[in-house]
Image (cartoon, grey):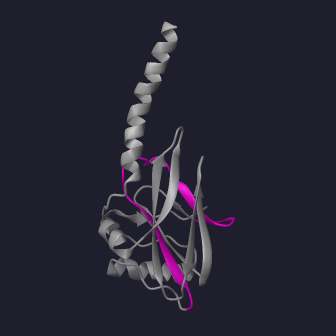
Amino acid sequence: MRPMLHRSLLCLALACPAFAQAQTAAEPAPADSTAPADTATPAQEASEAVAATQGKIAPPPAGKGQIVFFREKKFAGSAIRYKVREGEAELGKLSSGTYFVHATDPGAHEYTVHSEAKDILNMEVEAGETYYVIGGVTMGLFAGHPNLSPSDQAVFDGMAEKLKPAKALE
């Protein structure tokens, strides 16, 4: 009986800090960062070059919309990296303090991220528009749970100094 009580108390002691961290990690906190996005197409690379010189995201290519996926630079959850996908296509990888720009056709899109849990973000993209999506990590039982949330340019600009382009997918 006594060893079981000790194990229960040990489990509770280990779970409390994780629970407290999960509550603070779930709250989005503005940060600051900037850098050009990591892309796969020449149009996106040109967009990145302009962004680097102007310190902001360039407009999308003609007839396209674009989404800036970014993740705040934080120590909590920094070991967790995840890929943003649309269907089976991998668009980019988000790690702490990174971003990438995805140019896409106008219309409805469904973006997913997952580890032991899955998160889906549905978006309606219009030509000529730039949208911002912030990625985060909430703590799960065994691993972090990635998530995507709509954001805006002001939040991205506030973090821009500390953000760097995500590495290209291999």
Q: Residue at x 52, y 13 (%)?
A: 4
Range of residues picked out in magenta: 63-91
Q: Is 54 included in the stretch rendered in magenta? A: no
Quadrant occupied by the C terminus: bottom right
Given the current orientation, which residue lies at the most extreme top position?
2
**16 displayed left or right of 114:** left
Q: Position of residue 86 (x, y in %)?
A: 63, 68
Answer whether residue 13 is visible to the viewer in this image: yes
Q: Residue at x 43, y 20 (%)?
A: 9
Q: Residue at x 46, y 77 (%)?
A: 131
Query: Across the whole image, how many numbered discs are drawn on residues?
Result: 0
Given the current orientation, which residue lies at the most extreme right position?
88
Is the residue 128 above or below the residue 72 in the image? below
Q: Is 68 included in the stretch rendered in magenta? A: yes
Nearest to the observer: residue 2 or residue 49: 2
Q: On the image, which quarter does residue 59 sit in?
A: bottom left
Q: Position of residue 149 (x, y in %)?
A: 47, 64
Q: On the image, which quarter does residue 127 sit in?
A: bottom right
Nearest to the observer: residue 144 or residue 50: 144
Q: Position of residue 34 (x, y in %)?
A: 35, 69
**37 displayed left or right of 115:** left
Answer whether residue 75 is visible to the viewer in this image: no
Q: Position of residue 96 (x, y in %)?
A: 42, 55
Is the residue 68 above or below the residue 62 in the image? above
Q: Residue at x 47, y 25 (%)?
A: 11
Is the residue 116 above or below the residue 18 in the image? below
Nearest to the observer: residue 143 or residue 20: 20
